Amino acid sequence: MKEKLQKLSEEAFEAIKKATDTQMLNDVRVSFLGKKGSLTGLLKGMKDLTAEERPKIGQLVNETREKIEDEMAEKKLKLERSARQKQLISEVIDVTLPSPKIRAGHPHPNTVALEEVERIFVGMGYEVVEGPEVEFDYYNFEALNIPADHPAKDEQDTFYINKDILLRTQTSSVQIHMMEGGKVPVRMIAPGRVFRSDEVDATHSPCFHQIEGLVVDEHVTMADLKGTLESFAKEMFGEDIKTKFRPHHFPFTEPSAEMDVSCFKCGGKGCRFCKQEGWIEILGCGMVHPHVLEICGIDPEKYTGFAFGVGLERIALLKYEIDDMRLLYENDERFLSQF
Ligand code: DAH
């Protein structure tokens, strides 16, 4: 028995010495000291010993166990220390290396153009408001004097949710929200998304943005409209540009017009940018139709107003000389990072 214990102890020490990590060391513990380990196996032989031998051998077994355990504890400490050492070396941080550049994003061209438009109109005393994108037919068409058989109301052109509810096709609907109940005076711009059932191409998208403008007060005239929009155009595109108003038709304004600006690329001589015209159309406008004022409970004999609608993408494309609208929506960083 003594010899067996001696041999087991030597084997255990040898195994401990060979262990190169804590996992291996744990295997050694299980195979020598565990429930089914060699030392436990030896203990089973105790029953064959005489009564005098038993306590002596028992003590010897305990001593052997303690010796092995001590040796293991010491080895464990050593292994842990060297593992920590290795980790410290491998995780060393060289604080003198240059750090990777932080890549900050920046505003989308649409946002930059919108903020510029807002800045200009807020400077003239306008408030910036928003209206719903999902809208009643009443606000988008009916109250704007657009008759039931108007082509814009066709399912080909408008996304309907049901008979009475749709995705607004124009921000002009916000005019009604601002005026209904006879709330005057009004001096607002309303930017936002609009939706039309259009195929995607270089100049069309089923979702784009408009900025609506509306002024209603006593003594508002066409001269106010022209002066305001001319100041806006000059601030937006440069002091040297000229503006031109062409008669047009919109159901909710009378008279109505479209405003062109002289091409800021060629100065009006004609180029690829203005399609050789020298002029670029940038918005629709007009004097608020008396019937629209009436529908909103405003007395057209006392109050008059003007309104305008600008396509935000159109402004952004012109200002940044981008010739395909799709680029604005693809969010390709190589494109966006140029602005
Ligand atoms: N809502 C018109 C459109 O989508 C644009 C417009 C024209 C708005 C004339 C106006 C306006 O306020 O007076 O084509």
Image (cartoon, grey):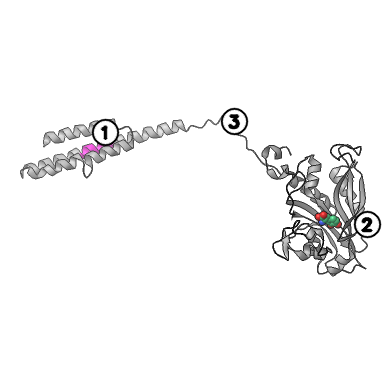
Instruction: Give the secondary structure at mark 1.
Output: helix
Mark 1 to mark 3 CA distance (whole Å): 46 Å
From the image, state whether disc 2 or disc 3 is nearer to you: 2
User: What secondary structure prevails in the magenta region?
Assistant: helix
Stretch in magenta: 65-73
Query: Percent x, y for residue 296?
Result: 83, 68
46 vs 116, nearest the viewer? 116
Q: Amino acid at mark 3?
A: Pro
Residue in front for this viewpoint, 7 or 266: 266
Given the image, on which type of amino acid does mark 2 rest? Met
From the viewer's perspective, is 46 left or right of 118? left
> What residue is shown with label 3?
98
Position above or below: 197 against 68: below
Q: Amino acid at mark 1?
A: Ile
Element class at badge 2: helix
Residue carrying label 1? 16
Q: Residue at x 45, y 31 (%)?
A: 90
- Mark 1 or mark 3, which has the lower sequence index? 1
Give the class, few, some or many, for how many residues have Cα within 10 Å of label 3's Cα (few <14, many ≥20).
Answer: few
Q: Position of residue 141 (x, y in %)?
A: 80, 63
